[in-house]
Image: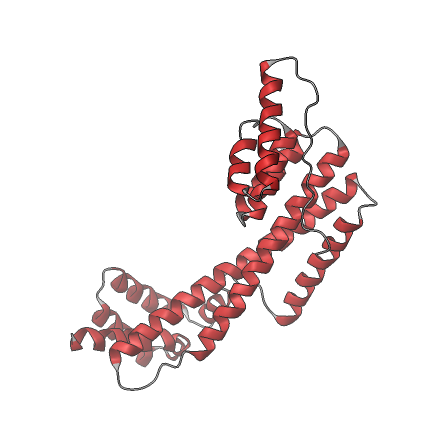
Amino acid sequence: MKRTLLIALVFVTACGSSEEHGVETALRTGARHYRSGHYAQADTAFALAPSDARAVFNRGDADHRLGAWKEAITYFDQAASLASDPMEQAGAYHNSGSTRLAEALQADTLVLKQSKELAAIKIEGDDIAQKVNLIVRRDSLQRMNQRMEALIDSSLAEAIEKFKHSLRRAPSDEDSRYNLALAQRIVSTRIKEGRGKGDGNDDKDKDKELTERAKAILQRADELVEVYKFQEALDVLQQGLKEDPTLKAKKEYVDKLDLVTKAAKAT
């Protein structure tokens, strides 16, 4: 990104009421903390002027610096709603989009790191307890990656919309134009790579291979697993494999149950 944030530390120059005085104090105190790098204190100070677009914007700015993406996004969106000037709205939308883009890039880095860890997991050997631990770790990483992929997709889509909102109000803003193109390029790359399947599409595709009888058998096994009757669930699936070959699509599930029951017997 060419630019991450706009910093709009604007102050009230005259105050004729206690409310205006409170806003000015919040802006000045927050700005002092912000410039000193004390972003948490800045956030607290700006929070004392919750109805002022500038203070709310600056609160988002401080939270972005802290890496508190969700909070920063909330405040930038609020600032866009509170601001009456189109350029102030454009700045808030730009920052909202930039924060969402930062959130997506951070999540992508985590997915790549966890994918390497997943690739290194080898479930082999005769140590049943170790194999069970590896399966649990693998499944945990897979679920986390699915959630992260879904987060990346949603954050990129929302970032694109925010940059468009910014450009509608400030068509000549090259920073928003650049970030919009970057977000769109990332989405295109993800599509080409077949990523963004954080909604469990792989499992859904496997389920499509099952007959209705196989799905009923699987549901019965799931019900037994829910009440920790792992051996009975395994028996249901193994018998089901003899009756309906399409259950082979769930071989990983069967193998996992087999390991769990063996581990239980070994304890």
Work out whether residue 226 can be spotted: yes
- Image coordinates for residue 153, horizontal then vertical, percent: 59, 57
Residue closer to the observer: 58 or 193:
58
Q: Is 57 placed above or below 136 here? A: above
Farthest bottom residue?
125
Q: Quadrant of residue 72?
A: top right
- Image coordinates for residue 79, horizontal then vertical, percent: 64, 34
- Image coordinates for residue 34, horizontal then vertical, percent: 59, 40
- Image coordinates for residue 182, horizontal then vertical, percent: 72, 59
Q: State the residue at coordinates (34%, 84%).
A: 124
Farthest right residue?
172
Q: Quadrant of residue 197?
A: bottom right
Residue closer to the observer: 41 or 263:
41
> How many marks overall?
0
Quadrant of the image for the N terminus? bottom right
Q: Is 263 placed above or below 184 here? A: below
Farthest top residue?
16
Q: State the residue at coordinates (26%, 83%).
A: 127
Residue closer to the observer: 142 or 212:
142
Work out whether residue 238 can be spotted: no
Q: Is 90 placed above or below 257 here? A: above
Q: State the residue at coordinates (65%, 66%).
A: 191
